[in-house]
Image (cartoon, helix red, strand yellow):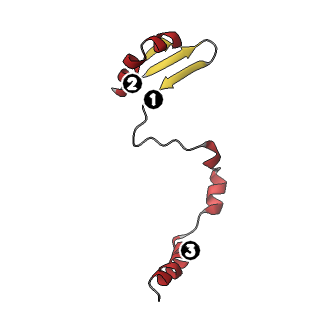
């Protein structure tokens, strides 16, 4: 892991971004703003806004069983095929 200052990062951004892309862990330290980790975004990265993340109990309240799902889907499928 490499720890660098914000000034050093600004001076050599391309170098450090290339290092992160190749798997190096880099931490940026700022006296005014604290520390930050540089992380590449990949096709597997998921950034979900906090407002969309529910508490576990809320998720369970919204969950349905497989039977309930079928009860909702079968009429729609039948309507699609005019049955």
Relative image position of residue 25 (x, y in whole percent): 42, 23
Mark 2 — residue?
Answer: 20
Classed neighbour count for the residue bearing mark 1: other residues with Cα under 10 Å, few (<14), some (14–19), many (≥20): some
Which of label 3 and label 2 is nearer to you? 2
Q: Is residue 59 left or right of residue 78?
A: right
Q: Residue at x 51, y 10 (%)?
A: 7
Residue 30 in view here: yes
Relative image position of residue 8 (x, y in whole percent): 47, 10
Mark 3 — residue?
Answer: 68
Q: Earlier in the sequence, mark 1 or mark 2?
A: 2
Relative image position of residue 73 (x, y in whole percent): 51, 76
Quarter holding the N terminus is top left
Q: CA distance from mark 1 to mark 3?
A: 41 Å
Q: Earlier in the sequence, mark 1 or mark 3?
A: 1
Q: CA distance from mark 1 to mark 2?
A: 7 Å
Near-viewer residue (2 or 15): 15
Q: Is residue 71 left or right of residue 81?
A: right
Tag 2 secondary structure: helix
Tag 3 secondary structure: helix
Disc 1 to disc 2: CB gap under 8 Å: yes
Q: Residue at x 63, y 50 (%)?
A: 54
Q: CA distance from mark 3 to mark 2?
A: 46 Å
Residue 11 in the image: above or below residue 40:
above
Mark 1 — residue?
Answer: 39
Near-viewer residue (59 or 35): 35
Disc 1 to disc 3: CB gap under 8 Å: no
Tag 1 secondary structure: loop
Q: Which mark is residue 2?
A: none
Q: Residue at x 42, y 13 (%)?
A: 12
Residue 53 in view here: no
Q: Earlier in the sequence, mark 3 or mark 2?
A: 2
């Amino acid at each position: 892991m490499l720890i660098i200052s914000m000034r050093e990062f600004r001076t050599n951004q391309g170098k450090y971004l290339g290092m992160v892309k190749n798997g190096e862990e880099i931490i940026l330290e700022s006296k005014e703003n604290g520390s930050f980790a540089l992380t590449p975004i990949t096709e597997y990265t998921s950034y979900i806004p906090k407002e969309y993340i529910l508490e576990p109990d809320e998720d369970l309240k919204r969950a349905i069983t497989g039977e309930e799902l079928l009860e909702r889907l079968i009429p729609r499928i039948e309507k699609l095929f005019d049955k």
